[in-house]
Image (cartoon, rainbow, N blue to C red):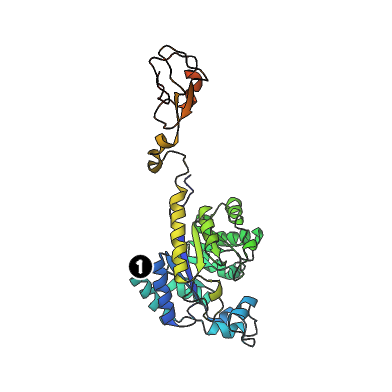
């Protein structure tokens, strides 16, 4: 069972839940670290490179940004950019808090910038999975890539993996995250078992990027063998912004991390055996062959004069047929353990 992960990498997705405030961003780092996540992840982009000024917001973005019906996607994103100085500040904050810094680039300029930071790990968001120049650039670094697959068919995933490989990335460095790009994702649309289909189809490590409410689905993903889990979190779900409502608050994030770590322990090594904790209960819970009534020495054991009762310190009932027909070597009182 060597493919069972010993430690699921948990990415606390701060994303743009800092609302453009470096102070909020630093608080998100501190809360992610307290929760026990391995990484806190932000988003690195220039609005001018990411979207046209006329592009409309997604329905969930429109619903979650205070009903600003006239605000374009560009206007919304422009307010959520992190500067170069912000990135340096947050990396320092992560180092002090004892958590890994991570960010997703959404355009080539941002890819170049993150490369200059030497993070050594890349996240391809679902929206960029069909962006060949973007994939080509990231693959050229030869560093591990986490690939999100929201809004994808298997063909889309295969095409992206092929693009990465053709540009120099070894498939062993690719982890594919099953994902649904709706915020929040309805439970009936999660289709978590598709994660296993991806693993079987492409022979890659797999994980899950979650946008549901609550922690049940990522915990289930860990039980199914996800090696990476990503979950949005916020300081306060009621804050204005596109992703807050589909995010966990700090205590919920902590609960999720603890639940995933418990699942990891519970998975074990896949070999069925008696554990140390339960061994002491064998004699209490199992049964032995005992006298059903007083039995005299020399009397033959029959279906009528022996029975099965706790404790399990005597002859196992699995030896029933071996005992039947033999003679008692001594007198036995009722309920006394039979010995041969």
Residue 326 x, y percent position in the rendering: 46, 14
Residue 90 x, y percent position in the rendering: 40, 76
Most extreme residue toward the left is: 96
Q: Is residue 100 visible?
A: no
Give the residue drawn at x 53%, y 75%: 244
Where residue 186 sits, quadrant-wise, is bottom right
Give the residue drawn at x 56%, y 80%: 49
Q: Quadrant of the C terminus?
A: top left
Give the residue drawn at x 35%, y 67%: 98
Q: For mark 1, does the 10 Å Cα neighbourhood hold few (<14), some (14 to 19), or many (20 or more) residues? A: some
Residue where numbered disc 1 is placed:
98
Most extreme residue toward the top is: 298
Where residue 277 sits, quadrant-wise, is top left
Residue 322 x, y percent position in the rendering: 48, 18
- The relative height of residue 292 versus residue 68 in the rendered view (above or below) is above
Q: Nearest the camera: 144 or 3?
A: 3
Give the residue drawn at x 37%, y 41%: 276
Q: Is residue 73 visible?
A: yes
Residue 58 x, y percent position in the rendering: 64, 77
- The relative height of residue 294 versus residue 197 in the rendered view (above or below) is above
Q: Nearest the camera: 131 or 60?
A: 60
């Amino acid at each position: 069972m060597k493919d069972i992960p010993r430690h699921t990498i948990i990415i606390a997705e701060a994303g743009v839940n800092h609302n453009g405030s470096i102070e909020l961003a630093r608080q998100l780092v501190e809360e992610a670290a307290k929760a026990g996540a391995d990484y806190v992840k932000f988003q690195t982009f220039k609005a001018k490179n990411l979207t046209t000024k006329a592009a409309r917001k997604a329905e969930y973005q429109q619903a979650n940004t205070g009903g600003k019906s006239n605000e374009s996607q560009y206007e919304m994103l422009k307010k959520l950019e992190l500067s170069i100085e912000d990135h340096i500040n947050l990396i320092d904050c992560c180092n002090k808090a004892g958590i890994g810094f991570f960010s997703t680039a959404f355009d080539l300029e941002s890819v170049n910038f993150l490369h200059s930071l030497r993070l050594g790990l890349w996240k391809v968001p679902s929206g960029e999975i069909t962006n060949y120049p973007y994939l080509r650039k990231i693959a050229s670094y030869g560093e591990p890539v986490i690939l999100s697959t929201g809004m994808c068919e298997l063909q889309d995933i295969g095409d992206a993996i092929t693009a990465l490989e053709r540009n120099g990335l070894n498939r062993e460095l690719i982890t594919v995250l099953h994902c649904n790009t709706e915020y929040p994702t309805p439970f009936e649309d999660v289709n978590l078992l598709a994660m296993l289909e991806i693993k079987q189809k492409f022979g890659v490590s797999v994980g899950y990027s979650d946008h549901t409410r609550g922690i049940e689905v990522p915990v289930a993903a860990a039980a199914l063998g996800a090696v990476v889990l990503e979950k949005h979190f916020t300081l306060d779900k009621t804050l204005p912004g596109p992703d807050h409502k589909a995010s966990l608050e700090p205590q919920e994030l902590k609960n999720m991390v603890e639940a995933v770590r418990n699942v990891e322990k519970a998975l074990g090594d896949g070999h069925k055996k008696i554990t140390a904790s339960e061994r002491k209960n064998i004699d209490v819970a199992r049964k032995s062959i005992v006298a059903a009534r007083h039995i005299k020495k020399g009397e033959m054991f029959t279906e009528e004069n022996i029975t099965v009762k706790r404790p399990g310190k005597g002859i196992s009932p699995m030896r029933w047929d071996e005992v039947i027909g033999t003679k008692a070597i001594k007198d036995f009182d009722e309920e006394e353990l039979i010995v041969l």
